[in-house]
Image (cartoon, rainbow, N blue to C red):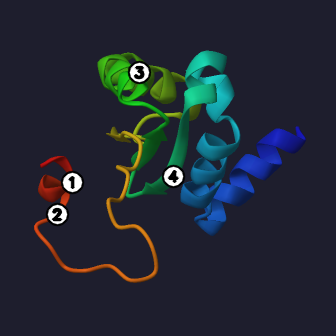
Amino acid sequence: MVGDVFGRLVTERGWSSPVAVGSVLSRWDELVGADIGLHCRPESFENAVVTVRCDSTAWATQLKLLTPALLQRFEVELGPGIVTSLRVAGPAAPSWRKGPRVVKGRGPRDTYG
């Protein structure tokens, strides 16, 4: 009963999108599973697109392969149209710039030869 009243209130006030964002972010581990949740975290959720950052390129590739199944699960668990796509990013690349004074040069090519 309380859930029905709350659901109507959310719909009437137009809060369904923020509630959906909170639901995806707070239930991430439950929605994708413990293994994926341990290695891939959602960074943002805008316009029904969830941006996910993985801690390795292997996990990013795995998540890209699982995207259709995850989108189907999101549709079943959250409702249609809440999440329409996943944008998967790997880990941030290391910077070659080191130290407080960096001389402009050819970049990483001069590091090796």
Type of amino acid under label 1: Thr
Q: Return the residue at label 2.
A: 107
Which is more foreground, mark 2 or mark 4?
2
Foreground pick, 17 / 38 = 38
Q: CA distance from mark 2 to mark 4?
A: 30 Å
Which is more foreground, mark 3 or mark 2?
2
On the picture, is 72 further left or further right than 30?
left
The residue furthest right is 2
Type of amino acid under label 3: Gln
Residue at x 49%, y 35% (from the top left corner): 55
Residue 39: x and y in percent read 56, 29
Foreground pick, 78 / 69 = 69
Q: CA distance from mark 3 to mark 1?
A: 46 Å
Q: Return the residue at label 1.
A: 111
Type of amino acid under label 4: Glu
Q: CA distance from mark 1 to mark 2?
A: 8 Å
Residue 57: x and y in percent read 35, 29
Q: Label 1's element? A: helix
Q: Return the residue at label 3.
A: 72
Task: Indicate whether 29 appears above or below 87.
Answer: above
Task: Indicate whether 15 appears above or below 37.
Answer: below
Task: Indicate whether 87 appears above or below 34.
Answer: below
Which is more foreground, mark 1 or mark 2?
1
- Of the two numbered discs 2 and 4 on the same chain, state the one appearing first in sequence: 4
Q: Return the residue at label 4.
A: 43
Residue 64: x and y in percent read 31, 25
